[in-house]
Amino acid sequence: MPKVTTMRAMWKLVDAYTLDQQGKERDVNHLNEWGGMSRVLKMPVFTAWSDLTTYDKEARMTRALIADDNWDGRVGANNQARWVAHSFQHCSGQAAFFVIHAVDTSAKPRSVAEIESGRIFVGQLEREGNLTYLRAQPRPL
């Protein structure tokens, strides 16, 4: 598989869309939306910053922070909330994420240095207070 180097290309790879205010499908805005519905996977797919993931060797699972209710007010946060709710309501909490690496993890806003495009993580969403995590196992794309 060729290496994907842009967020736009990654969203195309998973064939993801989001919804406009009238509920009509449109492409995920690769500049400031962090989730969408994948036609390929038939479930919501999210971005996950590499520094916000942890790996459990024993369970062979990667856990990623997908959403934080304190991110409210930003376009990406609203987009995440929509697809988290959709996953719980229509996909039994199943979802996927792909890992992105930041140029500088302390920058606000962050910019993407690299996208791990050869695999996607599929698993179960978990809520802990204001935080939503996705515990998942990798699978090739």
Image (tube, grey):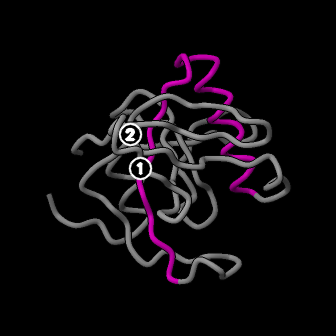
> Residue at left 62%, top 22%?
88
Q: Where in the figure is residue 53, as x and y percent of width and height?
A: 50, 55
Contact (Cβ within 8 Å) of mark 2 with mark 1: yes
Q: Where in the figure is residue 113, as x and y percent of width and height?
A: 43, 78
Which residue is identified by label 2? 61
Local SS, label 2: strand
The residue lying toward the viewer, choosing from 117 and 24, is 117
Local SS, label 1: strand
Segment colored magenta: 75-103
> Residue at left 61%, top 76%?
110
Tell me if residue 14 is in the magenta stretch: no
Q: Where in the figure is residue 78, as x and y percent of width and height?
A: 75, 47
The residue lying toward the viewer, choosing from 29 and 60, is 60
Which residue is identified by label 1? 55
> Residue at left 71%, top 40%?
81
Which numbered disc flags the more N-terminal residue, 2 or 1? 1
Amino acid type at image mark 2: Met
- In the rendered image, the quadrant that contains the N terminus is bottom left
Whether 51 is drawn above or below 55: the answer is below
Q: In the figure, residue 108 lies in which quadrant?
A: bottom right
Whether 13 is drawn above or below 44: the answer is below
Amino acid type at image mark 1: Tyr
Seen in the image, is 51 located left or right of residue 42? Answer: right
- In the rendered image, the quadrant that contains the C terminus is top left
The residue lying toward the viewer, choosing from 76 and 66, is 66
CA gap between label 2 and label 1 equals 6 Å
Q: Where in the figure is residue 67, as x and y percent of width and height?
A: 67, 47
Seen in the image, is 130 located left or right of residue 37? Answer: right
Tell me if residue 82 is in the magenta stretch: yes
